[in-house]
Image (tube, helix red, strand yellow):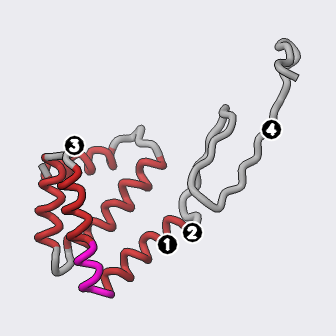
Amino acid sequence: MAGAYGGAVVQRMTDEGTDAAADATVSWGRRVLARLLGSSRGQQIGDAVTDLGENLEDPAFTAAVFAQVRRALAEDPELAAQIAEVRAETSAGKFAVTVTASTGVHVGDHNTQTITLVEKPDQPRSGR
C-alpha cells in the first residue's frame, strides 16, 4: 500500500493540471513524512501508516499513527523542531490562493478578503 501511495504522489506531482493548493498540501505532507520516517521511530511510523492505508475506515489505525508520531516527537526534540519549522513555513503566508468568480471564499488564517459586488445592467436587483 505504501508503494502504491508513493506512486500516486509521484503521479500527482507530475500531472500538468495539478491544482496549486493540492501541490502545496502534498509537498508539505511529503516533507513531514520524510522527516518522520527518517527518525528513530521511522520503522514504527511507516508500519502504522501502511496499516492505516489498508484500514482507512478504522479509527484505531489513525490513533496508532498519532501515537507513533507523538512518541517520535517526544523522544527527539530536534525532530519536533524540524516539524514545527515546516509548519511555520506553511502558515507564514508562503502559499497564495487566488479565487475568481466566487462569492465568499475563506482559505487559511490571517487573511484579508475583499468582495466587490458588481451589478449587471441586464439583471434585476434582488432582495433589497
The residue that mark 3 highlights is 57
For the point 23% across and 68% down, the residue is 67
**Closer to the eye: label 2 or 3:** 3
Q: Residues within 10 Å of mark 2 (few under 14, many from 20)?
A: few
Highlighted magenta segment, given as a residue range: 70-77
Residue density around tag 3, few if under 14, some if 14–19, many if 20 or more, within 10 Å: few
Relative placement, left or right, of 26 versus 89 is: left
Q: As displayed, is residue 19 above or below residue 47?
A: above
Amino acid type indicated by mark 2 = Ala
Residue at which label 2 appears: 92
> Tag 1 or tag 4, which sits nearer the N-term?
1
Q: Residue at x 41, y 51 (%)?
A: 23
Assess whether residue 75 is covered by the magenta stretch.
Answer: yes
For the residues bearing labels 3 and 1, Cβ distance under 8 angstroms: no
- Callout in the foreground (3, 4): 3
Point out which mark residue 116 bears. 4
Q: CA distance from mark 3 to mark 1?
A: 30 Å
Give the crowd class for mark 1: few <14, some 14-19, many >=20 residues within 10 Å.
few
Q: Main secondary structure of the magenta part?
A: helix
Residue receiving disc 1:
88
Return the disc, 3 or 4, that comes first in the chain's sequence.
3
Of mark 3 and mark 1, the one earlier in the sequence is 3
Left or right of 6 in this view: 20 = right
